[in-house]
Image (cartoon, grey):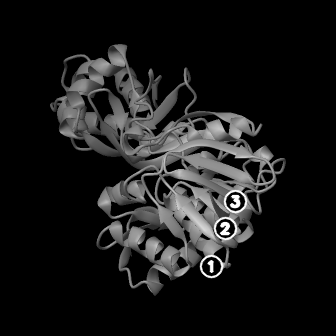
Amino acid sequence: MSDFDVVVLGAGAAGLFAAMRAGQRGRRVLLLDHAEEPGKKILISGGGRCNFTNTGCVPDRFISANRHFARSALARFTQHDFIALVRKHGIAFHEKTLGQLFCDGSARQIVQMLLAECEAAGVDLRLRHRVTDVARADRFTIATDHGTFRAESLVLATGGLSIPKMGATGFAHDVARRFGLPIVTPAPGLVPLTFDGSALDLMRPLAGVALPVVARAGRAAFPEAMLFTHRGLSGPAILQASSYWQPGGPMTIDLLPGQDATTLLLSAKRARPKAEPRTILADWLPQRLAQSMAASHLPPRIMGELGDAALKALGALLRSWRLEPAGTEGYAKAEVTLGGIDTAALSSKTMAATAVPGLFVIGEAVDVTGWLGGYNFQWAWSSGWAAGEAA
């Protein structure tokens, strides 16, 4: 049996960062993961270029039962701190839309940076170690298929349920329950939405069509791209709205953001009375979508023969297309897990479980979920840093 000051379970973004920071403080740190390589989700993120943070990272872009919980950790290790670390390692990066930062090269550069920092801090990284039991008496005992380890502090950084093909499991939730920590019911987040019935009949032939929209769910609105799929809707706007959508409830989509669709249609009727509606709509919408909307919502007449009421009704639909999703594509396609270990049981400053001395929970395992665009990586860095400072 080997003794350490800190054992971190999970060598993903949050776990690597927590282990790094604890090691920098002189703690003897063991980092365990069942996978054959560290940072697997980092490697596939951002199309292989890792959207590692966002310049506009603020607490109100995170979802939690306690909307103030993330504030402390995000303030103590900010996006600017992580950017400084990236610069220190000479990693070139660029900004895309909405403050999203990506590596110019490969996401592997971020993993290599974290591994280099962990090595410099003396972290003992052991892969292909499957944890079989976790217990606590005076210290934590972590049994694996390669031996047993003990530590004063245990950091749970094994993530959530999203992308199970990458090895995601509910392990952190199971351990939390074992120690009496409450769980906010998990659900897929940042996930494509599925439809059925007439809505799917309309969407399926449009698979592959994309356009800028404003997608709304609850009080949240996201002006980004939407993509039609064979099962429903995806694209950044839909993924963002999915985290706010409640099963059984509606969402609305503005197909012509920043424009008054009704005014456009009535003006086109006067200016081009002999034009077909699908031709007019194709000036503003992708052609296949224009044809579908015209066929579904207008009689087969030229513009000059259409009544104003029909054009006004179509204009209202284009401005606020109300849809009721049947569901989501689930954890297999979800980028993150909503819900998780209840923040009410954790310190917002240290990520420590208030009722279990020495236990820390970080990253996606916690009921804190960021927007699309680098926010969830920043939460991993910030929560990992907070735990690493205290573990």
Q: Quadrant of residue 218?
A: top right
Q: Which mark is residue 388?
A: 2
Amino acid type at mark 3: Ala
Q: Which residue is mark 3?
A: 151
- Is 15 left or right of 225, judged from the image as shown? right
Q: Which residue is mark 1?
A: 24
Spot occupied by residue 364 in the image (x, y as percentages of width and height): 57, 49
- Is 195 left or right of 372, judged from the image as shown? left
Identify which residue is drawn at 55% across, 49% down.
158
Spot occupied by residue 205 in the image (x, y as percentages of width and height): 20, 26
Exactly how many numbered labels are in the figure? Answer: 3
What element does badge 3 sit on? strand
Is residue 370 at least partly visible in the picture? no
Spot occupied by residue 268 in the image (x, y as percentages of width and height): 27, 38
How far, Cα to Cα, is label 2 from label 1? 9 Å
Residue 100 vs residue 347, the one in the foreground: 347
Label 2 CA crowd tier, 10 Å (few <14, some 14–19, many 20+): many
Marked residue nearer the N-terminal end (2 or 1): 1
Label 1 CA crowd tier, 10 Å (few <14, some 14–19, many 20+): many
Amino acid type at mark 2: Gly
Residue extending farthest to the top is 197
Identify which residue is drawn at 74% across, 64% down.
72
Marked residue nearer the N-terminal end (2 or 3): 3
Identify which residue is drawn at 44% across, 20% down.
326
Q: Looking at the image, do the residues carrying marks 2 and 3 touch, with CB atoms under 8 Å apart?
A: no
How far, Cα to Cα, is label 1 from label 3? 17 Å
How far, Cα to Cα, is label 2 from label 3? 14 Å
The quadrant in which the C terminus is found is bottom right
- Is 92 left or right of 349, judged from the image as shown? left
Residue extending farthest to the right is 355
